[in-house]
Image (cartoon, helix red, strand yellow):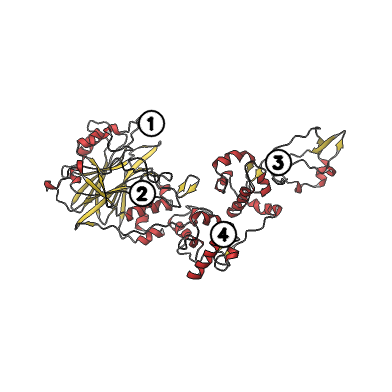
Amino acid sequence: MGGLCTRCRPQVPKDENTLVKHHGSFLRPKKTISAAFSYGATSNHETETMLEPLEPQLTTVRSTIDINAATEEDFMTVPNISRVVAHNIIDYRRQIGGFRRIEDLVLVNGIGAGKLEKIRKELHVSKSCNNLAQYSVVENITPPSYVNINTAAADIISTVSGLTDEISDKIVQYRVSNGEYHHINDLVEPAHIIDITTLLRVKSKLRINESGFHSRQASNVSSRLRNGSTSNFQGFGPECVPSTRARVATPPMMMDGRSIVRIATWNLQHCSSEKTRNPGVREVVCMTILENGVKIVGVQELADDKALNEIVNELNNPTLPNIQRFKSTSTWKCCVLPTAEGKLFQGTEYSGFLWDESVVNYNSSALVKKSVGGKEFARQPMLGFFKVGEVDLVLVNLHMEDDATDVLMRFGENVEDLPEILDAVDHHIDEEKRVVVIVDDFNMEPDETEFKAMRGKSYRPVIPCNVPTNISRKNMKGSRCRDNIWLNQSAAALYTSEWKVVRNGLTNPWIPDGWSWGGVVSDHCPVWVQLFVDHNLRDKSSILDTDGLTLKVDGLQNEN
């Protein structure tokens, strides 16, 4: 497997000139030897004078490897570490300037979480990465070579580990056809020569000029991210990866010559102010709203009452490139009530609304805290009163759970409260404002028997039970209908028969996904419904029977 480095795995000196025999036994230094001890720093005088008798049978002392100092040969003495993996560790260590903790090894190609747990006891990390400079002298590590992709020939570019001859030829061909590269990220977008993974691996070895600085500072991704939110990511990480989205046309606000509005519900899953400071989260949320032409959003699972502020600021004063290119002229506002809606994993949970003020007039909001009989709700529905076009609209924002046996549901916040909640909502709504839309996350399919009370009050779900609304990186198509929008009879009269479960564009390279990147913003998909807002509700003949309503979604027909 290779020789041992005595600095990382110290052994008893085997040079007989430094040992003294006494009655058949060996003598050894008294000085205690640590894993980081270097015999090169010990003088011969010290070795010869600090001696004590050894037993005839020598025992081997097992020591750990300093991952900031070890050579390839040192790493290869660890079980399950091949020469290829050892080389990858050294290469990654040079790129990041040294490991700060053992867990950083998970990001090395060839080492996963499982392997790390098996070899962790063999390793340790030096207290300071600054010691790498002196270690490089001992290891004879040559400084990394940089290749200028604006001047180097293809055979020189191919010397960079990870760039094949074919890739190197494409880099040169693109340069000849389109001029010099302005940023290393250009290799991914717009050149489409390498993927994100390869970019992260080779970025530290490439330059676009002799100084090493990018020439397009005003538009490079790193500076954009820092302008939008300081210190979201530091050093080697996802900030060097551009976020790209397919360009879509702005949806019209008219249908068949009549004004319309799109209303959405979205559980943003433990959404705190810290989460929305992530530029990937802001981009996904803002672009999803803009691309789908949504004008009102009911948001669930907010962790604090300031969580939506970053989203509103990004919509009104965009700092991220994709949002800037959209060139929205709308003015957005939000409302998050300071009173908790319920208990979110032993923390306070809030609900809120986002709306486009250029289209929607916000009147007020309130929490329904108690039932008509005085029972206090553990999860309190949030009412939002809006006027859109000619319609006075009441949105009921409700987040409930279906598992009353769960330890997190010890306050009884489950769907069994629905009949009393609906009665309390009716009590708070004036007769003239009966266009009611319930935006919810019930964690249940809409055909469950628990929703009998909803149907008894003429509410009908928009999303069929066979359409999933959840999402994850492992299952992008989803498996359960967890979120829905319910319309009362008056709202059904304004229903355009169009709805959508948004599933595209919910991932971003700047959002963590376990030990990797490119995660989803939430495990819930946003859902929207489209209503006419120029309708005269006194025309009773136009009220629709939604029991057999045919729903149209992107050209497809779905029977509800």
State how far apart marks 1 and 4 are (Cα): 54 Å
Q: Residue 99: x and y, percent?
A: 59, 48
Q: Residue 520: x and y, percent?
A: 41, 47
Q: Do residues under tags 2 and 3 come within 8 Å of each other at their CB atoms?
A: no
* Quarter location, residue 300: top left
Looking at the image, tell me whether mark 1 or mark 3 is earlier in sequence order: 3
Q: Say which amino acid is labelled 3.
A: Ser
Please name the residue that numbered disc 3 is placed on.
34
State how far apart marks 1 and 2 are (Cα): 29 Å
State how far apart marks 4 and 3 are (Cα): 43 Å
State how far apart marks 2 and 4 are (Cα): 35 Å
Q: Say which amino acid is labelled 4.
A: Thr
Q: Residue 490: x and y, percent?
A: 18, 44
The answer to whether 394 appears left or right of 96 in the picture is: left
Marks 4, 3: nearer the viewer: 4
* Quarter location, residue 161: bottom right
At horizontal 20% and vertical 52% (from top left) the residue drawn is 533
277 in relation to 369, above or below:
below
Looking at the image, tell me whether mark 2 or mark 4 is earlier in sequence order: 4
At horizontal 56% and vertical 57% (from top left) the residue drawn is 202
Q: Say which amino acid is labelled 2.
A: Arg
Report whether residue 32 is seen: yes
Q: Do residues under tags 1 and 2 come within 8 Å of each other at their CB atoms?
A: no
State how far apart marks 2 and 3 are (Cα): 55 Å
Marks 2, 3: nearer the viewer: 2
Name the mark on residue 503: 2
